[in-house]
Image: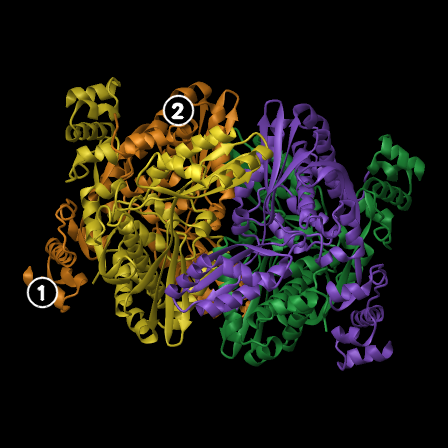
Chain colours: A yellow, B orange, C green, D purple
Amino acid sequence: MDKYLERLKNGTLKLHALEKELPAPEAIGVRRAFIEREAGVSLPKLGSFTMDPSVAVKKNVENMVGAVQVPVGVAGPLVVKGEFAKGPFYVPLATTEGALVASVNRGCGAITRAGGADVRVLRNGMTRAPVFSAKDIIHARGVKEFVDGNFAALAAAAAETTSHGELTGAMAFVTGTTVHVRLEFDTKDAMGMNMVTIAGERIADLIEEKTGARLVALSGNLCTDKKPAAINGILGRGKSVVAGVAMTDALVAEAFKTDSATLAEVNYRKNLIGSARAGSLGFNAHAANVIAAVFIACGQDPAHVVEGSGTFTTVERQEDGVYVAVTIPALQLGTVGGGTGLDTQRECLSILGVAGGGDPPGSHAMKFAEIVAAAVLAGELSLLGALGAGHLARAHKALGRGKTQ
Amino acid sequence: MDKYLERLKNGTLKLHALEKELPAPEAIGVRRAFIEREAGVSLPKLGSFTMDPSVAVKKNVENMVGAVQVPVGVAGPLVVKGEFAKGPFYVPLATTEGALVASVNRGCGAITRAGGADVRVLRNGMTRAPVFSAKDIIHARGVKEFVDGNFAALAAAAAETTSHGELTGAMAFVTGTTVHVRLEFDTKDAMGMNMVTIAGERIADLIEEKTGARLVALSGNLCTDKKPAAINGILGRGKSVVAGVAMTDALVAEAFKTDSATLAEVNYRKNLIGSARAGSLGFNAHAANVIAAVFIACGQDPAHVVEGSGTFTTVERQEDGVYVAVTIPALQLGTVGGGTGLDTQRECLSILGVAGGGDPPGSHAMKFAEIVAAAVLAGELSLLGALGAGHLARAHKALGRGKTQ
Amino acid sequence: MDKYLERLKNGTLKLHALEKELPAPEAIGVRRAFIEREAGVSLPKLGSFTMDPSVAVKKNVENMVGAVQVPVGVAGPLVVKGEFAKGPFYVPLATTEGALVASVNRGCGAITRAGGADVRVLRNGMTRAPVFSAKDIIHARGVKEFVDGNFAALAAAAAETTSHGELTGAMAFVTGTTVHVRLEFDTKDAMGMNMVTIAGERIADLIEEKTGARLVALSGNLCTDKKPAAINGILGRGKSVVAGVAMTDALVAEAFKTDSATLAEVNYRKNLIGSARAGSLGFNAHAANVIAAVFIACGQDPAHVVEGSGTFTTVERQEDGVYVAVTIPALQLGTVGGGTGLDTQRECLSILGVAGGGDPPGSHAMKFAEIVAAAVLAGELSLLGALGAGHLARAHKALGRGKTQ
Amino acid sequence: MDKYLERLKNGTLKLHALEKELPAPEAIGVRRAFIEREAGVSLPKLGSFTMDPSVAVKKNVENMVGAVQVPVGVAGPLVVKGEFAKGPFYVPLATTEGALVASVNRGCGAITRAGGADVRVLRNGMTRAPVFSAKDIIHARGVKEFVDGNFAALAAAAAETTSHGELTGAMAFVTGTTVHVRLEFDTKDAMGMNMVTIAGERIADLIEEKTGARLVALSGNLCTDKKPAAINGILGRGKSVVAGVAMTDALVAEAFKTDSATLAEVNYRKNLIGSARAGSLGFNAHAANVIAAVFIACGQDPAHVVEGSGTFTTVERQEDGVYVAVTIPALQLGTVGGGTGLDTQRECLSILGVAGGGDPPGSHAMKFAEIVAAAVLAGELSLLGALGAGHLARAHKALGRGKTQ
């Protein structure tokens, strides 16, 4: 140990090179010890984990020193009436923010009593948009024309790189001498960022070769990945999902201690007028909270919470109640790859019945998307209800400060 | 055990009520067993954790069934030259996405070789915006005039609810009969959402009483919390931070295998033109990745990654190199409250020297903000460099699929 | 004539230099003849105008060849209940789009029957935002600190350039090495762009001198002038105005052949959901139409229609009717300067009682703003009513194709 | 006369009904006299016009009282190298804002000396998006599926209403229970709003009939008409046009008294960073100014300036100069219909060689679009140059206040 620490200290051994000399568990231990010494701290809990580090250091993380533990609660049963997800589910939520699970749980209860949430996936396509430089606008237009006219060739290029994914669309955008080509893929049960990056590179090679345009970057921000962007709201990214539920006035009163008119007014003045006035791209109450908690529990990329925050929540009066819906244009998720292979994360996916690849391929990711949308609906319902009932601050006071009774 | 499972099954015991009858560890065990049975799965790893569950179930989560483990790597040393953070830091990053830590680490190396990143907090203020209904536009204007003319009274009302925080601003927005009042607070070392919600409620009571307007919701989306919104980019939320570093052409070449002109062009065509064309509110490469990883490691609210994604990355040619900067208008974080009290999360904060409240109050949160901004800068530099060098797809191939050598 | 045409043709006389050799009417005639010859066309009507060309060529236009005639209709009486505009008004609308005046007129009728529109100006401030380059982020922060701490000095600098206007605000925005300083002025009865540009230059000189930052451009797009921008919706530009009217169910039925619920639903699904889904900054039906028509009639800058299009229209059910309002955050207008001095435009302003400077200064512009907001309200009401009644296409068929009977 | 005035006064004759009793010129005269009396003003100049009022009152305006005269200047020669517009053009600009024509003219000179501006139309399609209400999200998804699967039927329905236009696209957007169907048409030489509204109504009838969804409004704001919206930037509306020009360092210096590096920096800090920071959808300097002036001169709908303001201006250093381009995603214009039939407006169109319908149909509108884009490029170049040279305030001082010498 000391020998390694000394070499790390004097720079003859790089922190990231420890795995080359030691098995993963030891490498991690030495590295943690080095950090403890450098920072003058002790990290015993960070060093306590049950995952197989030899897998993690290869697929999920570099310079590993341990693992952080995020408590997981369940909300449910939540009855989902999708095309892939049917029946009651308990949704695992990893969070450190008191009141969140309780809130979603309350929404699940209301939805379930209402007979369940209808859910449909409207669109499906993961995107990557390489960006090219053309020499002038005529050249740029030529690149666009090449893309518009050669879809089969682009698809064939993509097919050389993957047998799982498939190119399903290509749109070229000219901005002066800059050309973005937004490629869209069906990536089945994978979230698919790696797949589309690799396929995108092959397609970019082809475009460079055939048009003489120069590839500037494999990702040109029209994807748009992990940034809020209207393009994802309009064209979709990953899964575009919609979930809705009709609730009677009686159920609203019972579940949320408020009434249908108030629920609709809160949504109107907060989620519509408020977001419009804020120059926002997200017209919802807290979709990001629910998506973040499910994503962390289930090994998804948590930065994709950004796109999920572009959810539209709608509440409309109906004859004797309300219809509440969430529309999530860009929900990126997968049940294979990324963090889905880690033990605790896979267990969380298994609670939903979506661990690993589905049969047929893609069906697990679709089912997962439907459940997440229903959970977001539950979260929205519950928070709108709480706001309507004036509960918010009181709930925070009680739960946030550790006084639950 | 079986008795509880039976009562849960037949509905005579609610899932969330287990802690009323059993100590936390047992309650969690029964609940997990129930979920295992309901879902027909086994969750042994989820049940293995070292945190103190009796704390977690009171402050952080409800319906707890276990904990998910997220691997943590470190990037560094990263030399930060802030007003609160000075010197080299190792930044803990919790992630399941291979290549992220390696990428940030590469950026840290470059920054450190360049002498470190300058960082400054430009603004500091956590917000909450209750929304009111007025009876007509003249009444609405009256509410605005009340807010504009009675700051001291609003501040006094807030002060009744907290000795830690302080009201620092209040702006009223009229939209027809709807009035939003965006309240801004200095919340010291706390991220402050609970604090501002509670203080906001008291202020809302005062506004209702004095103006006759009716409170519709304590949060009216002009805050804006966990949704992308221009208002946060313009007025700031939480900490507004800027970090920058000058790099020579030689260092760019050595660190990123590319050149300064390419770095600037990638930023221009991707982060500026691409984001503009996408209708985006985020002009960066992947700020959300870095913020998400630090936030999960350090017990922050991961849904606040949404606001962080509104970062502006700029790259400008200088005489013999480039100047690269990130501007993060809305970075919400804290070193007390929320998930910061959990063992592994507090250990991660301790690596940065910011666990718990600072002396003076607020200084830990400021220091933490400076370090995060520098880490985001490292992440941006590295990804721009990789894109410039055409490395992206290859890096994903190697690291994402578990072939690191 | 021929001599001039020959010199223009052979390049020894520049087109714009004609006024140096000839009185305005002759210069215009020669120039028009030259264009007729070059383009091979005849422009007799363009040459028929009654304005005093010697004024126009000095203040309003260069290279003048004539004048275009835009037909003007009136809508009204429109009863306005503002703080400056009180009573019935006939609003002049210059337009070539059949059905527009008729539509606004119908809305005026409904408002007037409802007792008139309440209108209030919420804010008043014309802006200009010079942009500076700093050498690094610390320097940039220093510029912001200078601006934040020296308002009096900035105001004094502005005061050297104008006795009419007054600096009322200054906000600095740091983005990496770029610093924008958004200056806000009370420009009284002038729209004020020239005034603020000139005052802005003096302030920019001071900032350069005191901070060492370099002025890059006097207008840095955070103004924001003539581009749609969230900043104007949030902070306002020019006049921020709100107008509203309550209408009974009976009046809705009589005036619009539809009902209150339908009016509210059209606004909800079109102006709120539709605009949200479009990634729009304008949540209204056609505010731009009305603003454009009034602006062209009254000698305003028609490019400011862009900001006006960021209007929020709201329709809410009330006990026995609806409350309809328009909120216009950025309405830039004036009654002196620009095109207000031209004969026909001044006559249009006179119809509203706002030609020339008001007493006290600024009151004419305020009154004008109130009337415009009420007219926008009339236009919104009418179009929403027509959509509700399913009239739109039929109205277009009849009026757009010249079949009015 | 007095008899009519009395009847108007006592309400037995409606202002808009005058044309039913009197020939247009007399009707206009009586109406103007009535307004003069009501407002206590005299409107002699407004009553002086040369257009044929009997045409105007049928097609362009209701309640006509006269015409406003807007001075027209020309900028040019501007060499355009498009697919439809080839050669030098003089561009008519109707404006009351001093300095605008001079500025555009300076840009035209520079472009022409550079050999002309390349221009290409990238896309062409006028849109209208009716909005429907579905009973739940499953029904809403069904509407989308109907639209996705029945393009031929939709096109056939459209074809029943017009022989000029043609349906070229249909996209359905589900938001909860709301469904927008964005229809796109080739409207040849017409701007096409009436055409697409009428065809859109027929298609909406079909969708109602086949799906049972209820039409809420023929225009649902996803068109998006006359509001700033990301959807138009992404998908285009009307013509999507790009224009570009390469200029040598020498020409930049000569034409603009600045240098290429400065031009690029002004664009970067103002049009890119500034607009990004403002939450803007327009990344340009003053495209709206040029579009407004051409549109008013040429009888276009001036409210469409809103969409034009969403222009992207790019300036890039090249080996020995700069490449400057403008990309206008949504330029709506036509050479038949609307105001194009009025005398002075048609004369302005004739200067550009685009009055009336083209041969083949649509070619005039394409040519017109190319010229407008080149003119916008001229305006951008000139203002960026002026800002670069620090001329702005001085230019305003001299020209805006009538001191041209």
Give the chain of mark 1.
B
- Mark positioned earlier in the residue sequence (2 or 1): 1
The residue pinned by badge 2 equals B256
Judge whether residue B332 can be spotted in this image.
no
What amino acid type is highlighted by mark number 1?
A: Glu
Left or right, residue D301 beside residue B254: right
Say whether mark 1 and mark 2 are on the same chain.
yes
Vertical placement of C109 versus D287: above or below?
Answer: below
What amino acid type is highlighted by mark number 2?
A: Phe
The one of B133 and C273 positioned closer to us in this rendering: C273
- Give how far across and how far down residue A2 sits, in percent: 15, 22
Vertical placement of C337 versus C107: above or below?
Answer: above
The residue pinned by badge 1 equals B6
Q: Quadrant of the C terminus of chain A?
A: bottom left
Left or right, residue B104 beside residue A172: left
Specify the quadrant of the image occupied by residue D50. Answer: bottom right
Give the chain of mark 2.
B
Task: Find the distance from the CA under tag 2 to the CA under tag 1.
Answer: 61 Å
Specify the quadrant of the image occupied by residue A18. Answer: top left
- Give how far across and how far down residue A22 sits, in percent: 16, 24
- Give how far across and how far down residue A120 sits, in percent: 34, 59
Asked if labels 1 and 2 touch by Cβ distance under 8 angstroms, the answer is: no
Left or right, residue A76 beside residue D207: left
The one of A213 and B329 positioned closer to us in this rendering: A213
| Label 2 packing within 10 angstroms: few (<14), some (14-19), many (20+) | many
